């Protein structure tokens, strides 16, 4: 088995060092452990090591793992206690017809990038009598990307989401372009931070607007430098 404990230690040390360099507190950072490349044994191992914020980018897979954990918990009271602390983050592209199913498992969605998706979430949430926290996914890279609202349209969409009754805009999410050029990555994170500060400054969404989800295995140290509060890390932990 790959050494998840060792990998996790390395990531944690990387986070600590990046925080020290950026003069930020470790406690400002939430690590979301992305499980899409891991098998069930590895996921359980990560949970045992204290990873209880888990992220998946497909609803189907998220549901499979959540169900497996629930079944596993029935076998062992000790595991049940651990698994009860698990919180799921939906981090990938979300189709409107999967929203209801997802909201029954998790209320934290990082990938809201259209008005229609936000409306669907608010509508389904109202039927379930919940008010999920969501992040708006923004395309901060200069290249066209498949998902994410363009920076120029982000404020307007944030204003529209903020008026919806059963949804709480809790921050922004972005993915840096896949590039070995550090400046390209830095530009994208800087743009996300600027937009984040602007939306917060204009009080479009109230005090719960406080999360900036950015930074993956390759670029989380840079993301911390640019104000990330949530890191989404998979391969650095599981490979
Ligand atoms: C897979 C994935 C991650 C994690 O990427 P790693 O490079 O494995 O750390 C983060 N965010 C999203 C949206 C992903 O799909």
Image: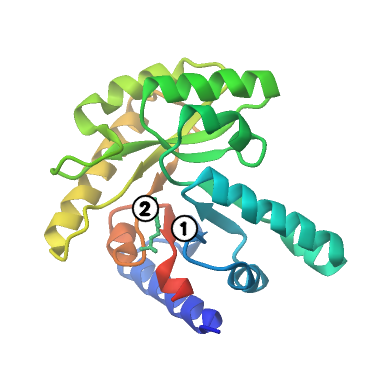
Q: Which label belongs to residue 29? A: 1
Task: Name above or below for residue 112 compared with residue 110.
Answer: above
16 with respect to 143 (left or right)? right
Q: Quadrant of ligand 1?
A: bottom left
Residue 54 x, y percent position in the rendering: 56, 56
Q: Secondary structure at mark 2?
A: loop
When the figure is inspected, residue 91 is found, relative to residue 16, above or below; the finding is above
Q: Position of residue 97 (x, y in %)?
A: 52, 28
**Residue located at (67% from left, 36% from top):** 104
Badge number at residue 228: 2
In the image, 233: left or right of 66?
left
Q: Position of residue 47 (x, y in %)?
A: 64, 67
User: Closest to the observer: 190 or 130?
Assistant: 130
The quarter of the image holding the C terminus is: bottom left
Q: Are marks 1 and 2 in contact (CB under 8 Å)?
A: yes
- Classify residue 73 by image quadrant: bottom right
The residue located at (29%, 25%) in the rendering is: 155
Helix, strand or loop at mark 1: loop
């Amino acid at each position: 088995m790959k050494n998840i404990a060792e990998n996790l230690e390395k990531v944690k040390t990387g986070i600590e060092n990046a925080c020290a360099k950026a003069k930020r507190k470790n406690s400002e950072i939430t690590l979301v452990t992305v499980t899409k490349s891991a098998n069930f044994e590895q996921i359980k191992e990560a949970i045992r090591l204290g990873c209880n914020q888990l992220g998946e980018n497909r609803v189907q897979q998220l549901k499979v793992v959540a169900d497996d954990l629930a079944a596993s918990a029935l076998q062992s009271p000790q595991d049940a206690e651990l698994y009860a602390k698990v919180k799921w983050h939906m981090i990938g592209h979300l189709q409107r017809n999967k929203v209801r199913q997802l909201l029954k498992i998790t209320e934290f969605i990082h990938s809201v990038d259209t008005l229609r998706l936000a409306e669907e979430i608010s509508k389904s949430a109202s039927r379930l009598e919940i008010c999920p926290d969501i992040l708006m996914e923004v395309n901060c890279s200069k290249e066209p990307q498949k998902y994410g609202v363009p920076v120029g349209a982000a404020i307007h969409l944030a204003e529209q989401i903020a008026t919806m009754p059963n949804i709480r805009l809790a921050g922004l999410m972005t993915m840096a372009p896949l590039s070995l050029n550090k400046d390209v990555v830095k530009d994208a994170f800087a743009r996300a931070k600027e937009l984040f500060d602007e939306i917060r400054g204009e009080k479009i969404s109230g005090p719960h607007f406080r999360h900036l989800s950015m930074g993956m295995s390759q670029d989380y140290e840079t993301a911390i430098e640019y104000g990330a509060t949530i890191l989404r890390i998979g391969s650095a932990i599981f490979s």
